[in-house]
Amino acid sequence: MSTAERILQELSTLRPEKQAEVLEFVEFLKTKAERNEDELFMRASLASAMRGMEEEEDLYSEADILEQTE
């Protein structure tokens, strides 16, 4: 018997309110997985965009970005 079949079998023995809790947990797990995938994609995209930039010369010095007060 597969895991999905076992889950369905056990789920059918629960009261409807407990089945609803199981559904909420499954939805939580899916959302969590999607967030993790989005974060991995974002990190990979940023790493790809920044690749090779460490060899570029600096256009500005620290003095260029400091706020001058008078």
Image (cartoon, rainbow, N blue to C red):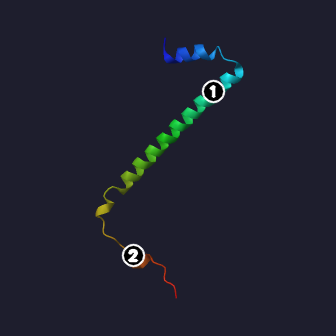
Residue type highlighted by circle 2: Glu
Image label count = 2
Which residue appears at 30% of the width and 69% of the height?
57
Which residue appears at 58% of the width and 16% of the height?
8
Q: Is residue 37 above or below residue 21?
A: below
Instruction: In the displayed orientation, state which residue is furthest to the top.
Output: 1
Which residue appears at 49% of the width and 43% of the height?
38
Q: Quadrant of residue 26?
A: top right
Mark 2 nearby-residue class (10 Å; few <14, some 14–19, many ≥20): few
Which secondary structure lies at badge 2? helix
Residue at the spot of label 1: 23
Q: Is residue 52 above or below residue 67?
A: above
Residue type highlighted by circle 1: Leu
Locate residue 24, reporting x and y percent: 63, 30
Q: Is residue 14 left or right of residue 2?
A: right
Which secondary structure lies at badge 1? helix
Residue at the spot of label 2: 62
Q: Is residue 18 above or below residue 42?
A: above
**Quick one: 3 or 54, which is closer to the camera?**
3
Measured in 3D between alpha carbons, the distance from the residue under mark 2 to the one under mark 1, in whole angstroms, is 54 Å
User: In terms of sequence position, does the residue under pointer 2 or pointer 1 come before the other?
Assistant: 1
Q: Is residue 64 left or right of residue 51?
A: right
Q: Which mark is residue 43?
A: none
Locate residue 49, reporting x and y percent: 38, 54
Instruction: In the displayed orientation, state which residue is furthest to the bottom.
Output: 70
Q: Is residue 18 left or right of residue 38?
A: right
Instruction: In the displayed orientation, state which residue is furthest to the left.
Output: 55
Which residue appears at 66% of the width and 22% of the height?
19
